[in-house]
Amino acid sequence: MINIAVLVSGGGTNLQALLDAQEAGKIPHGKIVLVLASNEKAYALERAKRHSVATAVVRRKDYGSQDEFDQALVQTLRDHHIELVVLAGYLSILGGHVIDCYRDRIINIHPSLIPSFCGKGFYGLRVHEAALARGVRVTGATVHFVNEIPDGGKIILQKAIAIEDGDTPEVLQRRVMEQAEWILLPRAAEIVAKKLDEEKA
């Protein structure tokens, strides 16, 4: 079984989807053993505590450089014997050291069909605002491996969601979460955990 860390910055709805999936037996090759937040006020930490999952906070502003932050992040992950990192609404940038230490072991959920509406500056509501402004009729979510290019890693899973007349960014965001993100992320976590588990055996 693979030890999983979920990195969060906010409310933790994707974390909740992962925890629910784990408890339903849908991630049999992995176990969430750590929830690491970029700020101490992230509500996701409360969700973790309710499910008896260890928590940690590593804040970028507590470190003088990106490299120092990366070193602290990696050390925290190693202290918990983490083998797979899942980014679930994590807003801090991961530097090269973290990516090198966990090459092909970091996955991220993005609220669009990559390569549309992705890359630097595209996160949260901004993605849905951009999709509506462009007039596309279909959006969705993508789970991908993390590399040095924002949203540039190999795609693992995608799911398309129709844009409906009268959608606001908030309404669209909710539909993409409920119908795509919360389904895809646990599924992708199991796909990668299973592969890593088999390699370890």
Image: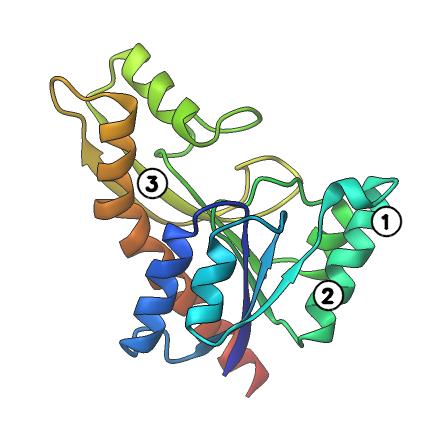
Mark 3 or mark 2, earlier in chain: 2
Q: Residues within 10 Å of mark 2 (few under 14, many from 20)?
A: some
At x 35% / y 19%, what residue is drawn?
129
The residues tagged by marks 1 and 3 sit, at their Cα atoms, a distance apart of 32 Å
In the image, taking residue 40 as reference, residue 45 lies left or right, namely left
Q: Tag 2's secondary structure?
A: helix
At x 43% / y 52%, what residue is drawn?
12
Q: Residue 189 at x, y = what percent?
A: 42, 64
The residues tagged by marks 3 and 2 sit, at their Cα atoms, a distance apart of 29 Å
Mark 2 or mark 1, earlier in chain: 1
Closer mark to the observer between disc 3 and disc 2: 2
At x 30% / y 53%, what residue is drawn?
182
Q: Residue 19 at x, y = what percent?
A: 38, 67
Pointer 2 and pointer 1: residues touching (CB < 8 Å)? no
Question: Relative to the observer, which residue lies in front, 61 or 126?
Answer: 61
Closer mark to the observer between disc 1 and disc 3: 1
Q: Residue 37 at x, y = what percent?
A: 60, 53
Residue 68 is marked as 1
Image: 162 above or below 133: below
Pointer 1 and pointer 3: residues touching (CB < 8 Å)? no
Q: Which residue is mark 2?
A: 76
In the image, taking residue 178 as reference, residue 101 lies left or right, namely right
Q: Residue 118 at x, y = what percent?
A: 47, 28
Q: Which residue is mark 3?
A: 141
